[in-house]
Amino acid sequence: MKIKLKRIAVIILTFTACTAFAQKTNQVFNLGSNDIVVNGEFNDFKLEIEVRQEVAGVEIATLTLTSPQKAVPSKFSLKWGVPSNNIAGYWSSHSFLDKTIAPDWGPSTVRSMLAREAPVICLFGHDDSNRQTFAVSEVLNTVISTTAVREEDGMMYNEIQFFTEKNRALSTYRVEIRLDSRPVPYSQALNDVADWWASFEQYTPAQVPEVARMPVYSSWYSYHQNVAMEPLLKECKLAKEMGFESIIIDDGWQTMDSNRGYAYTGDWEPERIPEMKEFVKAVHDLGMKFILWYAVPFVGEKSKAFERMKGKTLSHWKSQGTYVLDPRFPEVRKFIIATYVKAVEDWDLDGFKLDFMARFTANKDTKLVANDGRDYASVNEATDVLMTELMSALRKIKPDIMIEFRRPYVGPAMRKYGNMFRADDCPNVATINRIGTSDLKMLSGNTAVHADMLMWHYDEPVETAALQLLNVMFSVPQISVRLADIPEDHFKMIQFYTAYWLKNRKVLLDGQFHPSNPLMNYPMLSGWSSKKKITTVFADMVVPLEILPGTAIDIINAKSSKKIVIDVKGKSSQFQYTIQDCLGKETMSETVSLQEGVFSFEVPPSGLISFTQLD
């Protein structure tokens, strides 16, 4: 509510400028001191553009297309250039490992829609500052955003394309473009975009129950499809003692087929765990929540449901033996919704891990028309209706139901349905998990950001195994090793760092957050509140440390070397510092006077140093 009230006040207090164009191309308007070229054939549509200032340095253009009768809008785009002064790279939900600027013959591109990516690009400086961030309010239908540098003039050229796919006939279309040129940290610019999206009534994020922000045990990497009640209950007992509050039973419960495909998926009968109701109750008796995996779009070619759904599919994933259902058919939506409602009512589930949502997408062969039994032309719009109706039905049964989605279907509209966003699958690759969770965190607001399930080889030195957890400390951890089988020191390491995470989760999850040096894939992560700052460092580099009154400081050494070097700024102060290894064993505790300058400490690999002010 606070966000919406603030938004209304901004509109009232700032200026507006209106221009109308009809049947013209290459028209120009000004947004944030940028000349924006509107390129397109508008035919019967009249285009009105209103520009307003949200705050100093942030302007929003509202584009409204109107036609006296319904018509199919043609493709149009917005183009502008900006000098490449101190632009080191670009950030998008799709950039991931490569945030370098591309040349204009192969521009950096993000293609966003309901279940894929997000329509935002941030150009950042060598000092992690925001140079220019542009975002679009259209998060349902396809938007193509690009940025590139032209070698002839050293300019960055940006473009936003609309209606690149055939759309249904419209009489009115409205979209907002938000351009942020403030010299703030790029992470703040992205956080503010997430808040902007959330301020739209149609994109109001789902409530996040507290349990969705607590550690999770996952069956996937530890058991894969070989799931069974008794061994998993044993894991739950051990996990619960550590502070894990829910379990996700992943793929495998619904079929005896272990070929890792989806040919038998779609009936959703608990073939491998026939005692599902008893299993859920036993987990509840331990004080934990029970989340079950489903592949929402799939109806396997060998499932009984396939005959019912025949002819109501979007595509065939041949290698996986499954068809992708077409949500534009009301029978498909009814079938999917009934499946999940029945599961909650029959088994008393607490949530769902809803997988493969990105498969709900049109392809080159999709006929975007509402006929032959389809009541929607757009796949995206039909998916939105499906998920809206599904969430309404589930929340009537369990208002605090948990819904997990994973990259790339974690855009702003998906926050309406899901309250847990997870990094993409990255088994045993800690760096990828760090990048994925950090990227998610900057655009997800209060939606709980989860790490991909953590796993490692049990012969790993405990300091190396700990890196899997340390790379995702600023997200909700999901553990997927066999707690009953791992070495004793691995078990103690999970105990120690889970306890540390629980003690500091308000800072780790809710504090200000900044991943440094995006071109270097975030070698340092920092989070802070008014009373504490936590920095995790993944490479040998100098850690800036500003002394603020009453602020405790933790630095986690998430690397194999022992040296932690800090560069102190601020008024001199006395600190008690304590060094612990990854098992929680204290290796040193002394008093030190910190004043401006550089200090060095020996911290065990995967250990941490904690500073507490004494004066």
Image (cartoon, rainbow, N blue to C red):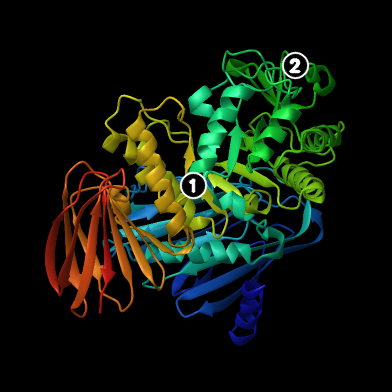
Residue at left offset 22%, top offset 44%: 605
SS at mark 1 in the image = strand
- Circle 2 crowding by C-alpha within 10 Å: few under 14, some 14–19, many from 20: some
Residue at left offset 31%, top offset 24%: 459
Please identify the quadrant where the N terminus is shown.
bottom right
SS at mark 2 in the image = loop
Mark sitting earlier along the chain (2/1)? 1
The image quarter in which residue 41 lies: bottom right
Please identify the quadrant where the C terminus is shown.
bottom left
Rounded to the nearest angstrom, the CA distance separating label 2 from label 1 is 36 Å
The image quarter in which residue 246 lies: top right
385 over 491 or under it: above or below: below
Give how far across and how far down residue 88 sits, in percent: 29, 57
Closer-to-camera residue (369/569): 569
| Residue 473, disc | none
Q: Amino acid at mark 1?
A: Val
Relative side of 600 to 376, left or right: left
Query: On the image, numbered disc 2 is attached to which residue?
Result: 303
Query: How many numbered dots are placed on residues in this image?
Result: 2
Asked if residue 49 can be seen in this view, the reply is: yes
Closer-to-camera residue (9/375): 9
Q: Amino acid at mark 2?
A: Ser
Closer-to-camera residue (485/364): 485
Closer-to-camera residue (580/98): 580
| Residue 110, disc | 1
- Circle 1 crowding by C-alpha within 10 Å: few under 14, some 14–19, many from 20: many
Residue at left offset 65%, top offset 36%: 283
